[in-house]
């Protein structure tokens, strides 16, 4: 397994991270039931396989099945302190908004995870409006509450997550308040990194010392569904190439991928370990006009 230093957190993290959304969301990509004993057993086998393969970063959120993902991780990671000889790195999230008590949300997460602290607490975001950012970084905002938790030793680092790559993301990066950014970046959503200009929040995050996690490397199935729609006869497995695309970007510290069973973990670990499968993003983006 390859490891990177996650920006100013200084933590060593596996290049392939375990995406915990699939542990709790029942109607997410394909239907599955985390309460079905067979489905549940597969989740635990998958997490064990991840630990055996040296994956040390596990990402979850209270929003993944109303705490279900955090509970599964808490059970599966009980007593585990390291993976691949590297300390375990557990990240969770908190929603931002007037109705959310940040401390209470984290305390519930810690209970479900069975931990005294987490390595990273991230704002669970989708798209940030200017008003959202004002509320987050302003006096008495979400960031202030998160930094107090850091000062109290309940979280080691703070970050934010975003599906979008708009102005709000750049303001959050430049605020200097956050240690990490988690952003949607994949073959069909390349706005966070445009090498030919060059431009993008991946560059901005690195410039400001933030660690970079990406979500949805296999495009959460969208690219594969598009191929099925336009050419059902095409049975080529594009997922390895989609994951390699994200790993080919040196600005990416961790590619989070959802893996519901041990087979998928083994498949994806083999992809990450096949460093010969990386491509040159500059060559891919070369243009003649
Ligand atoms: N706003 C946010 O904070 C946010 C939003 C989205 C995601 N995330 C984070 O990013 C993680 C990853 O994103 P995601 O789970 O949405 O999407 P994803 O990783 O793009 O997709 C996961 C799905 O891709 C399929 N897959 C994975 N590896 C494969 C392979 N080698 N071959 C074929 N299929 C493969 C699996 O589908 P099947 O299960 O059907 O086999 C798996 O459930 C999340 O778990 C979460 O930690 C955060």
Image: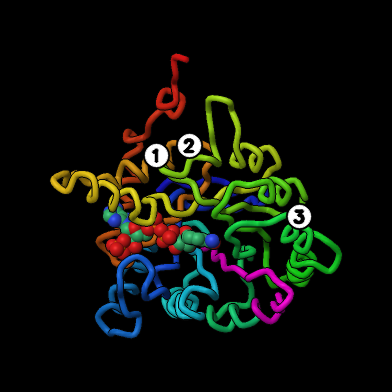
> Which residue is the site of mark 3?
177
- In the image, 182: left or right of 246? right
Mark found first going from the N terminus, 1 or 3: 3
> Which residue is the site of mark 1?
245
Measured as percent of width and height from the top left, residue 268 is found at 32, 52
Residue 13 drawn in magenta: no
Badge 1, how many Cα within 10 Å: few under 14, some, many 20+?
A: many
Name the residue rendered at 50%, 80% in the picture. 66
- What is the image's colouring? rainbow
Kindly report the distance in space between the C-alpha atoms of the residues bearing marks 1 and 2: 7 Å
In the image, is residue 277 above or below residue 117? Answer: above
- In the image, 257: left or right of 108? left
Q: Is residue 49 visible?
A: no
Span colored in magenta? 88-106
Measured as percent of width and height from the top left, residue 90 is found at 54, 66
Kindly report the distance in space between the C-alpha atoms of the residues bearing marks 1 and 3: 30 Å
Kindly report the distance in space between the C-alpha atoms of the residues bearing marks 2 and 3: 25 Å
Which is more toward the observer, 40 or 140?
140
Mark found first going from the N terminus, 2 or 3: 3
Q: Circle 2 sits in a helix, a strand or a loop, which is it?
A: loop
The outermost residue toward the front is 230
Q: Circle 3 sits in a helix, a strand or a loop, which is it?
A: loop
> Which residue is the site of mark 2?
249
**Quarter of the picture for ligand 1?**
bottom left
- The answer to whether mark 1 and mark 3 are in CB contact below 8 A is no
């Amino acid at each position: 397994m390859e490891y990177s230093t996650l920006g100013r957190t200084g933590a060593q993290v596996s290049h392939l991270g375990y995406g915990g959304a699939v542990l709790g969301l029942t109607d997410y990509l394909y239907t599955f039931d985390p309460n079905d004993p067979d489905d549940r057993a597969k989740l635990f086998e998958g997490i064990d396989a991840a630990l055996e393969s040296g994956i040390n970063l596990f990402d979850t959120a209270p929003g993944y099945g109303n705490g279900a993902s955090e509970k599964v991780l808490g059970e599966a990671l009980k007593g585990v302190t390291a993976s691949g000889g590297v300390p375990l790195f557990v990240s969770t999230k908190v929603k931002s908004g007037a109705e959310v008590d940040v401390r209470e949300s984290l305390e519930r997460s810690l209970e479900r995870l069975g931990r005294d602290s987490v390595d990273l607490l991230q704002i669970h975001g989708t798209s940030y409006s200017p008003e959202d950012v004002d509320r987050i970084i302003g006096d008495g905002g979400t960031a202030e509450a998160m930094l107090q938790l850091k000062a109290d030793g309940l979280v080691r680092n703070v970050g934010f997550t975003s599906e979008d790559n708009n102005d709000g993301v750049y303001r959050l990066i430049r605020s200097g308040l956050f240690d990490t950014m988690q952003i949607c970046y994949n073959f069909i959503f390349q706005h966070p990194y445009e090498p030919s200009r060059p431009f993008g929040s991946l560059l901005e995050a690195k410039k400001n010392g933030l660690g970079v996690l990406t979500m949805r490397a296999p495009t959460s199935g969208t690219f594969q569904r598009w191929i099925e729609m336009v050419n059902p006869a095409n049975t080529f497995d594009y997922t390895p190439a989609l994951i390699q695309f994200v790993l080919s970007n040196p600005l990416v510290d961790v590619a989070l991928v959802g893996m519901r069973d041990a087979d998928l973990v083994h498949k994806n670990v083999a992809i990450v370990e096949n460093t010969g499968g990386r491509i040159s993003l500059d060559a891919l983006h070369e243009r003649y006009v």
